Image: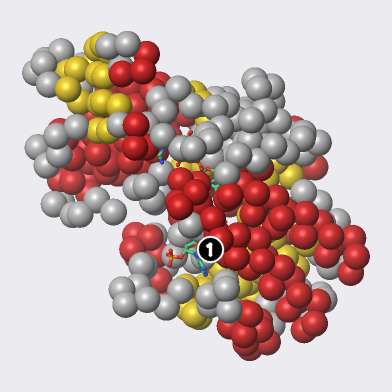
Amino acid sequence: MKKKIALITGITGQDGAYLANLLINKGYKVFGSYRRSSSLNLWRLEELGILESIELVSLELLEKSNIERIIKLINPDEIYNLAAQSFVSLSFENPIYTAQADALGVLKILETIRAVNKKIKFYQASSSEMFGEANSKKLNEDSRFHPRSPYAIAKVFGHYITVNYREAYGIFACSGILFNHESPLRGTEFVTRKITSTLVEIQAGRKKNLELGNYYARRDWGFAGDFVEGIWKMMQNKQPKDYVLATGEEHSVKEFADLAAKMVGFNLTWKGSKHNEYAVDKNTNKIIIKKNQEYNRPADVSFLKGDSTKAKKELGWKPKVKFKELVKLMIENDKKKSLKGKIIQ
Ligand code: NAP
Ligand code: F7E
């Protein structure tokens, strides 16, 4: 039987690496797109031991000529559009670039599919950030969007243009509204991996303390390895539909940091007022975690919790890794890297 061909944009990112691993194990021929730069960022693919099994192609989302050339060359069965400027904080500093990549980039791929081969299936990486400020209820596919950052607003465009190309042109285009998912391969700019990698570095004597912004933000954190299974299942569905993927459980940044610190071996006590709370290690009396207002965002999302009942019922998807296990997985991995003297990236 002919091997299915997949193109994953953003192969050098966290989800790109896990999804590539999954598709290779399922017998796909995987093409992965990267951005040309002076130093290629392939460490995730190397860590999973799959670099040799992927055909790398260069693609910049802002450049429609790149997209057309690659899609015509590969003519894939499935395109997974994971490439994006995905850091919410940065989207406040680079809003125009973020909109060009995360909103118009999606349209450029869809327009190419429409012109080149309407049978190519398309997955769009949408985000729970689109819900934005949503009080404390569980969010599902019918919940209202109130995006709070240029990133989230660009993702809303990406989401609706995907729905539009499905409805208008009959393209198999689906959008996964994914809540935060983390792993040892998460970038260190995101809060979970910033916490685990910095705490391990402090314990090894290479850093002094961990500085955080909004301790009280609450997120529904799952494991990226579980979430890419859900992404693949959406693309194998009889009909293209949109799904929320989430664990249904939320925790604060402070809870995450507290648990991670315990796992590293600190014995923390929290002190100070709500706006200037800090955590001291009872054994050494040193400040381990402190507040830095610079990490606050002009507008943040205080609470996100998802309801993935539809994905469970229709796709048979459910996350396996629980919160505590996830924190442990990340800490253990960073500890291993630290022991080997590797740079924690
Ligand atoms: P990530 O680690 O930041 O990876 C993003 C990927 O996109 C990287 O390969 C990056 O390449 C590439 N990229 C960025 N700008 C590009 C451009 N202009 N042209 C071409 N490629 C570009 O993100 P992730 O966590 O794997 O997330 C994957 C996707 O899911 C993203 O679209 C993200 O917005 C979305 N999402 C993520 C989560 C989550 O919790 N992880 C939740 C919901 C949705 P470089 O390596 O060169 O930077
Ligand atoms: O922030 C707070 C911060 O940057 C989580 C992306 O994958 O998931 C991710 O977006 C929360 C926010 O992720 C620091 O203010 C406190 O409230 O880890 P994050 P995010 O913004 O939720 C969604 C679903 C995506 O789609 C995105 O692509 O943590 N926070 N102190 C901090 N955040 C960071 N980064 N650094 C801090 O020091």
Query: Which residue is painted at 70% across and 41% down in the image?
Result: 244
Measuring 63% from the left and 68% from the top, which residue is drawn there? 105
Residue at figure coordinates x 38%, y 51% from the top left: 187
Which of the colour schemes (rainbow, by chain, secondary structure, one colour) is used?
Answer: secondary structure
**Residue closer to the observer: 286 or 90:** 90
**Disc 1 secondary structure class:** helix
* Front position in the image: 103 or 219: 103
Q: Residue at x 9, y 18 (%)?
A: 284
The mark total stands at 1
Q: Alpha-carbon neighbours of circle 1 within 10 Å: few (<14), some, or many (≥20)? A: some
* Placement of the C terminus among the 4 image quadrants: bottom left
**Residue 256, position in %: x, y?**
39, 27
The residue indicated by pointer 1 is: 97
Q: Amino acid at mark 1?
A: Tyr
Whether residue 19 is visible to the viewer of this picture, yes or no, is no
Closer to the camera in the image, 306 or 88: 88
The reply to whether residue 114 is in sight is: yes
Q: Image height check: is 90 above or below 63? A: above
Residue 36: % across, % down: 42, 78
Q: Position of residue 96 (x, y in %)?
A: 56, 61
Q: Taking 189 as reference, is 135 above or below it? A: above
Quarter of the rendering occupied by the N terminus = bottom right
Closer to the camera in the image, 222 or 60: 60
Mark 1 C-beta closer than 8 Å to ligand 1: yes
